[in-house]
Amino acid sequence: MKKILWIVVAILLLATFSDHPVLLPYKQKLYAKFSDTTHSASEVKNEQALQKLANLLQEFGSTLGKGQQAELKKVSSSKAAVLEFQQSYCVEQQFHPLFYGDTIRKVCTIVQDQSNGL
């Protein structure tokens, strides 16, 4: 327990004196490293969420026709395509020639549930 306390104290001291000209370059390198790491972690999350959405849409589309399956694959091809589909057909409720009625509601529900991770 004492080791953890000393580590916290050391980090606080470093944070306090990190604007010192001797320590400033190291602080900037450390922040850049953390920034790069967090950015790459969020990219993986986006890719995983898109892959999960594609799998769910493919699973749902297995009962639909080939044209509808191709359209679902196209919709789940990129984040921009998903967001465009969601805006046009789920939010604005425009007419989609392949999906209507219960089918479009189910697709919109799947997209809405998974769009938080994108």
Image (cartoon, rainbow, N blue to C red):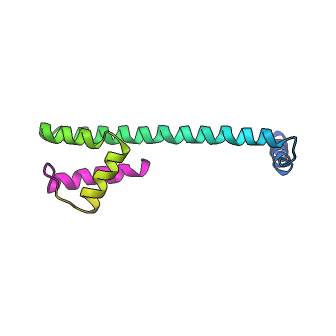
* Looking at the image, residue 77 lies above or below residue 110: above
Locate residue 26 relative to residue 32 in the image: left or right.
right
Q: Is residue 99 magenta?
A: yes
- The location of residue 63, given as percent across then percent down, is 15, 40
Please state the horizontal and vertical placement of residue 116, each as a whole percent of the image.
41, 52
102 part of magenta stretch: yes
Residue at 30% in and 54% down: 86
Image quadrant holding the N terminus, namely top right
Of 93 and 105, nearer the camera is 93
Q: Is residue 43 left or right of residue 23?
A: left
Q: Which residues are magenta?
A: 96-118
Q: Is residue 89 above or below residue 30?
A: below
Question: Which residue is found at the position 56% from the left and 41% from the top?
Answer: 39
Q: At 77% across and 42% down in the image, what residue appears?
A: 27
Q: State the image coordinates of residue 4 (x, y, percent, origin top left).
A: 79, 42
* 77 with respect to 36 (left or right): left
Quarter of the rendering containing residue 68: top left
Given residues 55 and 79, the one toward you in this image is: 79
Q: Residue at x 60, y 37 (%)?
A: 37
Q: How many marks?
A: 0
Please tell me whether the stretch drawn in magenta is mainly helix, strand or loop.
helix
> Which residue is more in the foreground, 113 or 39?
39
Residue 7 lies, in percent from the top left, at: 81, 41
